[in-house]
Image (cartoon, grey):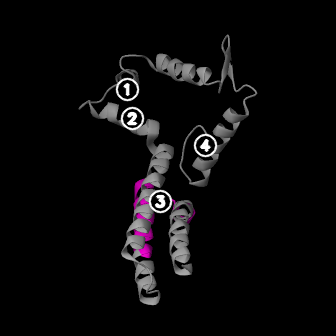
Amino acid sequence: MSELIYFYSFTLVLALTIILCLLLLGYINPCITLQNRYMFVSIAGLIGWVFFVYYSISHFYTIRLVDIISTTMFLLASILAIGVFWSLICWGFTTSLLVALSCFHYPISADLWYSSYSSGSTITDFTNDRLSILIRLGLVARSSDDILIPGSIFAKVLSFTYRSLLRIYRINQSFI
């Protein structure tokens, strides 16, 4: 039984280590692209998992196939969840703009690009649309031409967390 606790605990620690490795790779070699950073860490995690399973099988005879399968599924699900988190931080809005631009096979103006992305609206309309969502959620307030973060602790924490994650993972954004 203690071998199983060790086995499952290692799987959890390995999944959490993947997040830490994404962070460290940004400091060790910031030239590695964001996609390659995620792929490298995921593959390294899976290779580490294979070595761990081999070691566990050779030293603990009570580990069953169902334990290996379940912890492998947990690790793969963790890698996928981390991938969603990572892609939201790195590429959410940027990728959507790129997809809109890829529909054109010739150079276009920035206004046409924004219009294509936002279904015919201008960048001002698009910004006001996004702003209205933030206002409805209570994350920002608007008075005449001024926009501010009200006393909402959640909005300040969310903004701080996002900016911190971008800095921690060394993702360049001009608005930080």
Kind of residue sitting beneath label 4: Tyr
Main SS, magenta residues:
helix
Which portion, as a residue range, is magenta? Answer: 24-49
Q: Nearer the viewer, residue 49 or 67?
A: 67
Per the rendering, the mark at residue 162 is 4
**CB within 8 Å, label 1 to label 2:** yes
- Does residue 16 sit above or below 160 in this rendering? below
Spot occupied by residue 153 in the image (x, y as percentages of width and height): 73, 34
- Find numbered disc 2 in the image and state the secondary structure of the residue it sits on: helix
In this view, which residue lies farthest toward the top? 144
Does label 3 or label 4 sit earlier along the sequence? 3
Q: Using the numbered discs, state the Cα–Cα distance from disc 3 to disc 1 in whole angstroms.
A: 29 Å
On whether residue 29 falls in the magenta region, the answer is: yes
Does label 3 or label 1 sit earlier along the sequence? 3
**Mark nearer the viewer, 2 or 3:** 2
Where is mark 3, residue-wise? Answer: 31
Q: Using the numbered discs, state the Cα–Cα distance from disc 4 to disc 2 in whole angstroms.
A: 19 Å
Where is mark 2, residue-wise? Answer: 96
Q: Residue at x 65, y 27 (%)?
A: 139
Does label 4 or label 1 sit earlier along the sequence? 1
- Does residue 54 sit above or below 131 in this rendering? below
Spot occupied by residue 157 in the image (x, y as percentages of width and height): 69, 39
Where is mark 1, residue-wise? Answer: 117
- Find numbered disc 4 in the image and state the secondary structure of the residue it sits on: helix
Figure label count: 4
Q: Using the numbered discs, state the Cα–Cα distance from disc 4 to disc 1 in whole angstroms.
A: 24 Å
Per the rendering, the mark at residue 93 is none
In this view, which residue lies farthest toward the right? 151
